[in-house]
Each structure stands twice: as C-alpha cells, then as structure tokens.
Image (cartoon, rainbow, N blue to C red):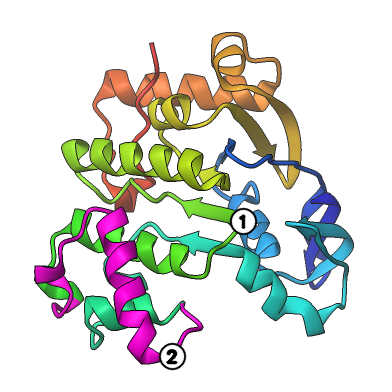
Amino acid sequence: MAGVAVAYGATEVLRDFSIEVARGEVLALVGSSGSGKTTALRALLGLAPISRGLVEVAGRRFAPGDRRRLGDLADRAQMVFQDPLAALDPRWSVMRSVREGLREDEAKSAARVRELLREVGIGVELEDRLPHQLSGGQRQRVAIARALAAEPALLLLDEATSALDVSVQAQILELLEGLIVSRGLAAVFVSHDLAVVRRLAGRTAVLDRGRIVECRPTEALLREPEAEATRGLLAAARFASVSGESTAPGAGGSVIVPS
C-alpha cells in the first residue's frame, strides 16, 4: 500500500498509509482503539473506500474506484478473524467451510480439503462436524485452512489468537509461523498483545489517528520506542499488567508487556 487514504463522509480515518510486506514476513499493526488498524485491513481486502493511493498485492495494482478488480484482490488476500465461531457458517461442516475457498469441482476438492486440514492439524474424523462441535483452537485451524484454500499471497490476521486460551494460543502461533515460512506468505497481523507481536512479527508499525508514526524492527521498537504513541501503548500495557486489569477478548485483548 502506498499513500492510501480512506474517508467515511468528511472524516478521513486513514491518511497517507504506506506499508510494504515481503513474502515470508509478518508485519504487525498496533495502536489504540480507533487508530485505523481495522480500516487498514479492510483497505487491503478492497472493502474500504480508498480515496487516494494504491494497493498492490502479488503484482496486481488497485487504485481508487477500481471496483472491477476486487475479485482479483480477494483471490490474493485472505483474512483470519478474531472469533472463528462467528466467522464460520454454523450450518456448514468443516469440509464445506474449507471447500468454499476452492475453485475445483467437488470430486477433486474433497481430497484437496483433506490436504489443507492435515496441514493445519485437523484430522479426517472432524471433517463432518459443525463449528459448535469443535473447540476454539480447532475452529481457528479450520478458519486458517479456509483462508489458505484460495492460495493467497497475503494473509491478514485480525486479533487471530486473542480469543484463545494461552496454551492454545501458543499452538496457533506456532502453526502460523510455520505456514508463513513454508508457503512464503506475506502477513499483516493486528494485535493488542505486545508479547504475541514480539514473537510473530519481524517489524511493527504503530498507527495513531490514521497515520503510521513509527515502523521499525519489533525488538528495537519495543525496547526503545521513538513515537509518543508507541510510548503510550507500552505504558498502558504496563499499567494493565500491574493492576491486573481484565485481558478478556471483549476487553480489547491481552496487553502483556514483553520483557
């Protein structure tokens, strides 16, 4: 993305937004609520009204008003959401949910779905189950398999582990790390949890009121923040950690401070 602006009416919620993510790399987006993180992901999916700038994914460029090519953009970028139970159709089996992203006929796609499920750690004994019959971790694995079915170049992760308990979160992070490297995916990861950001993202961009105010290697950024907004995020995380403030998903996700 280069110089992207997104406006809703007279309010510009993303301004001069520019990022570049290489294959095999994870870029984290962090910022306070309302800073523009979700809008940035929507712009990468072609779902936000871009008024200026350019989005390029895997060699395909999309400019403001280029609605005809949104299907191409969707082919190249896929999202994994925070709550897999809400993201999956409650009436669809595991097999059907993952098959949705394929372009093969049904006879061929069943075998392909099973390959994808194996890749994310789901056995064939679960392929006929509905979402409510799965654990939270299993549902998120299915959601990841569904995203991979379209063979995207860019994976967008919107708080993709914050609804999971700590042990399952670690397993999903390990899975994502392996998939990003083995498939050569570029990934953009939105999270409030700075410990997770530190583990997964090589670089981190800090958003403040729709602008990137800092974008550097994650370790350096967390160790010596330069922007006032970054220092504010770290201070808020430390306060929440010391005070024992709730870190439930409904409260905005975990805010563990990395050591």
Where, quadrant-wise, is the C terminus in this rendering?
top left
Place of residue 54 in the rendered image (x, y in percent of width and height, measured from the top left) = 86, 58
Which residue has dot 1 on it?
Answer: 153
Instruction: Classify residue 119 as left or right of residue 211.
Output: left
Toward the viewer: 239 or 36? 36
Q: Is residue 208 visible?
A: yes
As drawn, is 22 to the left or to the right of 236?
A: right
Crowding near pointer 2: few (<14 within 10 Å), some, many (20+)?
few
Amino acid type, residue under disc 1 in the picture? Ala
- Residue type, numbered disc 2: Asp
Who's the residue at 64% across and 46% down the image? 35
Q: In the figure, 214 relative to 27: above or below?
A: above
Question: In front here: 251 or 96?
Answer: 96
User: Can see residue 246?
Assistant: no
The answer to whether residue 219 is above or below residue 127 is above
- Measured from the top left, where is residue 118 in percent x and y? 25, 58
What residue is drawn where x is 30% and y is 83%?
96
* Upstream in sequence: badge 1 or badge 2: 2
Q: Is residue 222 left or right of residue 50?
A: left
Query: Where does label 2 land, which residue?
Result: 105
| Image coords of residue 130 (percent x, y) | 17, 79
- Residue 126 in magenta stretch: yes
